[in-house]
Image: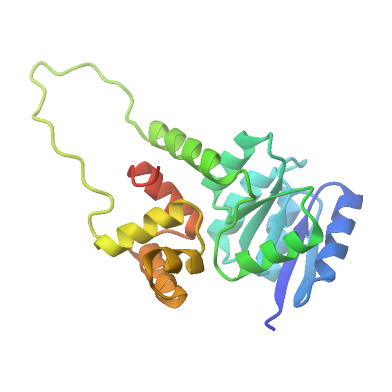
Amino acid sequence: MTEVRVVVVDDQALVRVGLCGIVATGDGLTVVGEAADGLAAVDVVTRLVPDVVLMDIRMPVLDGIEATRRITAATASRVLILTTFDLDEYVYGALRAGASGFLLKDAPPEDLHAAIRVIAAGDALLAPGVTRRLIATFAALSAASMDPAPVDPAPVPPAPRPAPDPLGGLTDRERQVLALVAEGLTNAEIGLRLHITAGTAKTHVARLLHKLDARDRIQLVIVAHRAGLAP
């Protein structure tokens, strides 16, 4: 089993020690560093470049969202946010910052182990109950934030141009796969739905990531919602 190197970030010492202990009990998981605030996290991760960073959000000096933004911009490390379900606004910010997954803080140890492995493998993960409502709302907020500011109308407005199709470069099959990714299906589940192998589904997802210039499956879900492809 390939070793997964982890850095744990939390401002509460007891929580941080507990998380380190839980991670260390997982097969193939190794804690290589820890930090008590976002600024220290950026320094530790930049030096050690772990596979996965367990990131708290509300911390002194530098919060977890800005720390995530700096980490994902400067390294290949992937960030798993530890959150609580009632703090959706923080999750939106972490999505924008490039986080690859979210897990509730009350998740059992085996779920934490599985989440770390999923993130390390290059997939994205959202805690059950967060996925569709949160992503759909985030997509709407992101689209609204990208709208241009209102301006005074010109005396003779130019003829409207049709908006480019953000999915114009995709095949019909890739559109099908993207829609199923947006539903939260795994590669195996996509394969069953489309009567293809899990390996073929994985290949389609990889092509989607490349064509849409997406970091991971979370960004694919966002693209699907912005394009109106997801329910």
195 relative to 177, above or below: below
Q: Which residue corresponds to the image point at 68% horizontal and 46% vertical from the top-left?
A: 64
Question: Which residue is at the far right?
Answer: 14
170 relative to 37, above or below: below
Quarter holding residue 199: bottom left
Nearer-the-camera pick, 211 or 1: 1
The image shows residue 16 at horizontal and vertical percentages of 85, 54
Q: Quadrant of the C terminus?
A: top left
Residue 212 shows up from this direction = no
106 relative to 209, above or below: above
Q: Quadrant of the N terminus?
A: bottom right
Colour convention of the picture = rainbow
Numbered disc total? 0
The image shows residue 204 at horizontal and vertical percentages of 37, 69
Residue 83 shows up from this direction = yes
Nearer-the-camera pick, 10 or 197: 197
Quarter holding residue 32: bottom right
Q: Which residue corresponds to the image point at 37% horizontal and 65% vertical from the top-left?
A: 194
Nearer-the-camera pick, 149 or 229: 229
Left or right of residue 42, residue 194 in this image: left
Q: Which residue corresponds to the image point at 38% horizontal and 53% vertical from the top-left?
A: 179
Left or right of residue 226, residue 44 in this image: right
The image shows residue 60 at horizontal and vertical percentages of 77, 41
